[in-house]
Amino acid sequence: MSHRTVVISTFDDYLAEEVESLEERAAEKAERAGLLIRFPHAVMLKVSYPELDFADRWCWQRFGPRDGECMQRYSEYPACERTEVHSHSGKWTSHWWVKTDYDFGFNEWYFAESSDRESFAANVKNISFGENYHK
């Protein structure tokens, strides 16, 4: 059994937990609204960095590459072999909103298709620190 700290959350939970200026809050809401135009199906989790990497690898394996700049060179569970700066076009993406504790915070995954969102949501119970961490 691997470590697990995943907490199902919402964007509203994030907004309630983080206190920022009205200008910063408006910018975050606008940024999210922009993401939701292309990827209208979202799942917010509070996760540790290893869990985020584990979940991203799962998404890559099921839905293909994450849309946008590839950050896999920093991942504990890399799904992309390329190490140079590059980007991918994909049907899902994610956004790290804020760190709330040491290596832990809010991350939201966005999907172009509702079936992919539902598949990811059904898999949340399996997200953990992964095979690199054992109790």
Image (spheres, rainbow, N blue to C red):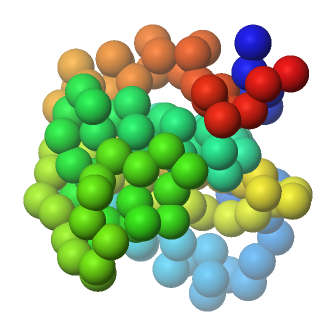
Quadrant of the image containing the N terminus: top right
In the picture as drawn, the residue positioned furthest to the left comes out as: 89
Residue at image coords 74%, 21%: 2
Quadrant of the image containing the C terminus: top right
Label count reads 0
Residue 134 percent location from the top left of the image: 78, 25
Asked whether the viewer can see residue 8, the reply is no
Q: Is 105 on the left-hand or right-hand side of 75?
A: right
* 117 vs 60, nearest the viewer: 60
Q: Quadrant of residue 131?
A: top right
Residue 44 higher or lower than 105, as above or below: above
Q: Quadrant of residue 32?
A: bottom left
Asked whether the viewer can see residue 122, the reply is yes
Residue 100 percent location from the top left of the image: 82, 59
Residue at image coords 47%, 16%: 123
Residue 13 higher or lower than 59, as above or below: below
Residue at image coords 29%, 39%: 60
Residue 114 higher or lower than 72, as above or below: above
Q: Is 32 on the left-hand or right-hand side of 102?
A: left
Residue 37 percent location from the top left of the image: 22, 56
Q: Is 95 on the left-hand or right-hand side of 24?
A: left
Q: Is 61 on the left-hand or right-hand side of 107?
A: left
* 87 vs 45, nearest the viewer: 87
* 33 vs 71, nearest the viewer: 71
Residue 116 percent location from the top left of the image: 25, 26
Q: Quadrant of residue 23?
A: bottom right
Residue at image coords 28%, 57%: 81
